[in-house]
Image (cartoon, rainbow, N blue to C red):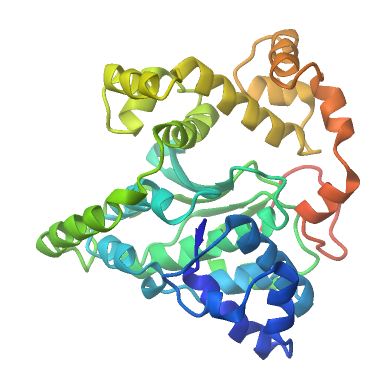
């Protein structure tokens, strides 16, 4: 499921483009009332498809970016007020990574250490084959930029977009201002420097934050994600950073390694099983990216020999080697997954603005 949040603004934005929002919602299988309340929930796949169909109907490939750009603290509800009361930006980022799974099940943010003490806060969908996944992730970058700017006034020094550069990047430049924009990146993410992360927030309020924290815990107690899902979410950024051990995963989940193992055993699972599942999921997502060779995917996932990676992938895929799996992806899936930046160059080397 996906909390409506800032998506509540889509009907108004479509009307501003001269498009009847009801017709777009009907194509997605949504009723206008389902987008009337930011606190409501809709299926994640429909949320992503809505962004894709709204983008098509508006005639503006930057539509997802513009939706994210109207985000305000209020669109996050109680969580927004909780973030605004954080002591510093790093704490606010950690909060949204921790609590986001209560809002959304199909995708979400992750954080990982970056160069020179910086921090990357990224966004990914758990099933990259969902129609509109890239558009939703692109909008999430604008959303995160607006929210973190609102609570801290800080600007990311880099904005990573895992898409080719559009023919006209004016909307990107207008939103992200002085930040360096890097297209064809391996992440959708915002990179903040250490100084920006540790500066005190103007709205820091320990007493209010403690009160809101108790309220959030009580409100979402029944929506705690399953331990399997929490482990899989934690493993993705850890895989990318090369620190995907039981111990590092337990730290990310605020558990001891033994407690994590106990919780997994209760559900008939194991860390090794989920580790393989997460690695396979990442492998599928990276292999689907035509910019990366199989050898590059193998290396990115920590394999010193491509033959070992090929054996792993073939076993997990039910006998299909990675090269055959890539070739079997339909052109229709590729067409829906990557927005049509009219006039954009092929997916080749990384480009920045």
- Whether 307 is drawn above or below 39: the answer is above
Residue located 62% across and 77% down the image: 31
- Whether 303 is drawn above or below 58: the answer is above
| Residue 87, x across and y down, in percent | 21, 56
Of residues 60 and 195, the one drawn nearer to the viewer in this rendering: 60
Of residues 188 and 328, the one drawn nearer to the viewer in this rendering: 328
Tell me: 225 left or right of 136. Answer: left
Residue located 82% across and 61% down the image: 340
Examine the rendering and report whether any part of residue 69 can be seen: no
Q: Quadrant of residue 243?
A: top left
Q: Quadrant of residue 214?
A: bottom left
- Whether 67 is drawn above or below 19: the answer is above
Q: Quadrant of residue 22?
A: bottom right
Of residues 271 and 222, the one drawn nearer to the viewer in this rendering: 222
Tell me: 170 left or right of 176. Answer: right
Tell me: 106 left or right of 93. Answer: right
Query: Where, quadrant-wise, is the C terminus in this rendering?
Result: bottom right
- Whether 208 is drawn above or below 157: the answer is below
| Residue 19, x across and y down, in percent | 74, 86
Residue located 70% across and 8% down the image: 308
Number of numbered markers = 0
| Residue 88, x across and y down, in percent | 26, 55
Residue located 57% across and 59% down the image: 43
| Residue 208, x across and y down, in percent | 14, 65
Examine the rendering and report whether any part of residue 266 can be seen: yes
């Amino acid at each position: 499921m996906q909390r409506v949040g800032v998506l509540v603004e889509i009907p108004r934005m479509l009307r501003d483009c001269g498009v009847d929002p009801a017709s777009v919602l009907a194509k997605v299988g949504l009723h206008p009332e389902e987008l009337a309340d930011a606190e409501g929930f809709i299926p994640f796949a429909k949320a992503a498809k809505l962004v894709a169909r709204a983008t098509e109907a508006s005639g503006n490939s930057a539509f997802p970016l513009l939706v994210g750009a109207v985000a305000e603290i209020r669109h996050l509800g109680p969580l927004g007020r909780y973030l605004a009361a954080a002591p510093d930006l790093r704490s606010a980022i950690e909060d949204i990574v921790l609590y986001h799974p209560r809002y959304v099940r199909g995708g979400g943010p992750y954080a990982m250490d970056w160069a020179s003490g910086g921090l990357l806060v990224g966004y990914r969908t758990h099933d990259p084959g969902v129609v509109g996944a890239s558009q939703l992730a692109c909008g999430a970058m604008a959303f995160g930029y607006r929210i973190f700017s609102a609570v801290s006034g800080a600007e990311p020094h880099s904005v990573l977009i895992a898409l080719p550069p559009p023919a006209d990047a004016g909307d990107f430049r207008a939103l992200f201002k002085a930040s360096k924009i890097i297209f064809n990146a391996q992440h959708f993410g915002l990179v903040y420097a250490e100084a920006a992360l540790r500066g005190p927030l103007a709205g820091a309020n320990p007493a209010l934050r403690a009160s809101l924290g108790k309220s959030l815990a009580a409100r979402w107690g029944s929506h705690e994600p399953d331990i399997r899902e929490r482990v899989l979410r934690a493993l993705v950024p850890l895989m990318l950073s090369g620190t995907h051990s039981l111990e590092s995963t337990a730290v990310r989940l605020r558990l001891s390694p033994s407690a994590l193992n106990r919780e997994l055993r209760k559900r008939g699972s194991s860390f090794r099983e989920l580790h393989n599942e997460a690695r396979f999921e990442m492998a599928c997502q990276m292999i689907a990216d035509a910019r990366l060779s199989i050898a590059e995917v193998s290396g990115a996932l920590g394999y010193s020999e491509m033959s070992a990676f090929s054996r792993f992938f073939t076993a997990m895929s039910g006998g299909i080697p990675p090269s055959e799996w890539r070739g079997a992806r339909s052109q229709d899936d590729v067409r829906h997954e990557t927005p049509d930046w009219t006039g954009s160059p092929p997916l080749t080397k990384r480009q920045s603005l």
